[in-house]
Amino acid sequence: MSQPLRVDLIVYPGFKALEAIETLSVFEYANHHLLQHGRPRGYALRIVAPQAGRVASDMPMALEAAAPLSLQDLPDLAVIVGVRDIDSALQRQPALVDWVRAAAPRLPTLVALCTGCFFLAAAGLLDGQPATTHWSAVPLLRARFPAVRVEPDRIHVRAGRIWTSAGVTAGMDLALALVEEHHGRALALEVARDLVMYLKRPGGQSQFSVHLQSQGTDHPGIRAAQDWVLAHLDQPLPLAELAARALMSERNFRRQFGRAVGQSPARFIEDARLEAARRLLEDSELPQKTVAARVGFASEQALRKLFARRLGVSPQDYRARFGGSAG
């Protein structure tokens, strides 16, 4: 890449400061490492807004927008930051929606962080396309823009030239994915280590840790069953045994589990096994057959099928890409 890519970070009053700063940091750290390797800077960073000047964030800080939005001076990569109150932001920023609609066909890459995707959806860019956002905004996105194929559990989603991410720190994962695409995996991992990130999460990874989800369950019997699952993934986990631990019939357990957790017991178990398998592949050099056994699969084939269906990669490719010794 001979010339740096022009990156415009688009902010507006009330934008999420953390999302803005973390995204700029990933690209600036990438520049730093490129220079250390004797390579030219990869990114020319600029802050823009509907109106140039000081733009207040959701925190006691502001950013200075160097220029206003323009259709005559488009960047290579535009990044729209999210906001806490997206309903109000949409009402206050119709010009941003208009700019997105007009600029999108000429932008090589368009990124929306968190609720920033609502501006894209309002411009009609996400109709029929997959997208994600912060988990708390998923119901509103679905209700407001039913034509969008919302993928609520993804860290980030790519649909051609358009990228969307989950909330807050997921913007760093998306920015790292772009750095990897532009400059290679090794550089992206150098940046991740500098930022003390857990390497780099794949876009298909869940927004939630299964362990965190179980801690948020209010029903004590259901939470006890979840804890048992997480501690005994290497064993068969029949519904009858889980229901007995929750002191319920199987039918009532299935119903109460769905209410408390928002998914079926079978899906929770699958999520837990997938997360445990990912961690083993990332953090150890155990053979795949051993990994499969430790998370409750009788064969490597079952593990491969789960990874292909849920993450779109094989366990071997996942380890090569995200394992601690990769790159």
Image: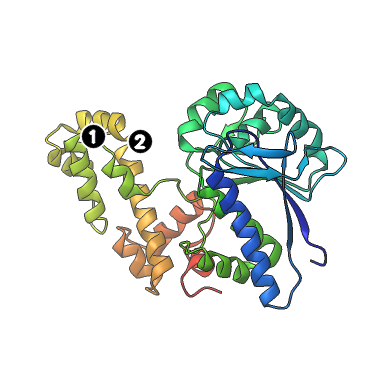
Q: Position of residue 63 (x, y in %)?
A: 64, 44
Q: Residue at x 44, y 53 (%)?
A: 306
Q: Residue at x 56, y 28 (%)?
A: 86
**Amino acid type, callout 2:** Gln
Mark 1, secondary structure of its residue? loop
Q: Which mark lies nearer to you, 1 or 2?
A: 1
In space, the residues marked 1 and 2 are separated at their CA atoms by 15 Å
**Amino acid type, callout 1:** Asp
Is 67 above or below relative to 177? Answer: above
Q: Position of residue 143 (x, y in %)?
A: 54, 22
Q: How is the image coloured?
A: rainbow
Q: Residue at x 24, y 45 (%)?
A: 226
**Where on the picture, by quarter, is residue 190?**
bottom right
**Where on the picture, by quarter, is residue 128?**
top right
Q: Residue furthest right?
A: 72
For residue 8, side relative to residue 258 (left or right): right
The crowd level at tag 2 (other Cα within 10 Å; few <14, some 14-19, many 20+) is few
Location of mark 1 (residue) = 218
